[in-house]
Image (tube, helix red, strand yellow):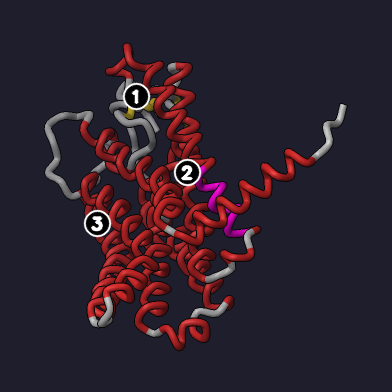
Amino acid sequence: MMLGNQTRIDKFILLGFQEFYEFQIFLFLSFLVIYIVTVIGNILILMLVIFDQHLKMPMYFFLGSLSFLEICYSSNIFPRMLSALLTGNGSISFSNCFMQWYLCSSLVATECCLLCVMSYDRYLAICKPLHYLTIMNSQTCIHLTASSWINGFAVFSILLILMLQRLTFCSSNEINHYFCNYFALLKISCSDTWLLEIMSYVVAAIFTLPPFLLTLLSYVCIIDAILKIPSVTGRQKAFSTCSSHLVVVSIFYGSLMTAYMLPRSENRDMPKFSSFLYIALPPLANPFIYSLRNKEVREALRNNIGRFVLYKSTSPFII
């Protein structure tokens, strides 16, 4: 890969938020708090799902997988962004840049599939309660989760990254973004990128639109079934079993649509702020939503904290 003066380059420069130089410390501290809270919250949910016997159900198996995904997703973006804010060094090698983009896009595709699987789980629980445990057994849970990860990593992004690696960069190696964003990479390439732009929308439509439509269909059936329940208490109880997941789905797809479906602004920095919605908001919000709106998770959290406090208070001090 050559620059215009034919000097060989071996890295990109992520410009990040350099235009807000006077706010670098504030941005660093803000993003650090977001990252720490995100990781701790999702680790807490994951640990509860693994160790608490009251959460040994398919719904929470999928929730644990989602929390693990959110930890990986945030850790793919935030550490390098925080390092660049702290040191001012935004350089990243070609291979690391492509790998960061591959992981980011693959995890987004995997989350689409996992949310679809979770909506199917809620559909079975509400619309086919008598057959729920028979259909959604442990083997089915493992197969559905594995299929979601395989679809995201082995199918979705690999087609694009093979084409992306064939691009040449001869005008600039500076990416006006805080991570290796797909369209930011296309913008600085001197190759003809129209095919890659079309392919990105085609691949995204093939591998992420069906999960979205299936999720939407599941909730249409769920809402229809809830409305047919005669008692108000019964409707409230049925809706409470899927309300947390519905809020998570709304935040995830809402942030994605805000980032990619709104008209492109002439402000060259707008894509950075719009992409931050789906980078930070869903991983940060999910633990709070499930812990605040889900009774079983709240009780498991309260019980485990109570046992930990009791253990610490009764343990002898070791000098």
Q: How many marks?
A: 3
Q: Mark 1 = which residue? A: 15
Q: Is residue 120 above or below residue 86?
A: below
Would you say 61 lies left or right of 11 here? right
Which label number is shown at residue 99?
2
Mark 1 or 3 closer to N-term?
Answer: 1
Q: Residues within 10 Å of mark 1 (few under 14, many from 20)?
A: some
As drawn, which residue projects farthest toward the right? 319
Q: Mark 3 = which residue? A: 201
Residue located at (87% from left, 26% from top): 319
Q: Is residue 94 visible?
A: no
The prevailing secondary structure element of the residues shown in magenta is helix
Residue 43 within the segment the image draws in magenta: yes
The reply to whether callout 1 and callout 2 are in contact (CB within 8 Å) is: no
Residue 196 within the segment the image draws in magenta: no
Would you say 205 lies left or right of 78 here? left
Q: Position of residue 185 (x, y in %)?
A: 32, 38
Q: Position of residue 57 (x, y in %)?
A: 54, 70
Mark 3 or 2 closer to N-term?
Answer: 2
Bounds of the magenta span?
Answer: 41-50
Label 1, label 3: how far apart the Cα atoms are: 26 Å
Using the image as rendered, state which of residue 241 and residue 275 is in the foreground.
241
Residue located at (32% from left, 23% from top): 17
Q: Amino acid at mark 1?
A: Leu
As helix, strand or loop, the secondary structure at mark 1 comes to loop
Q: Amino acid at mark 2?
A: Met
Which label number is shown at residue 142?
none
Residue located at (51% from left, 41% from top): 39
Label 3, label 2: how far apart the Cα atoms are: 20 Å
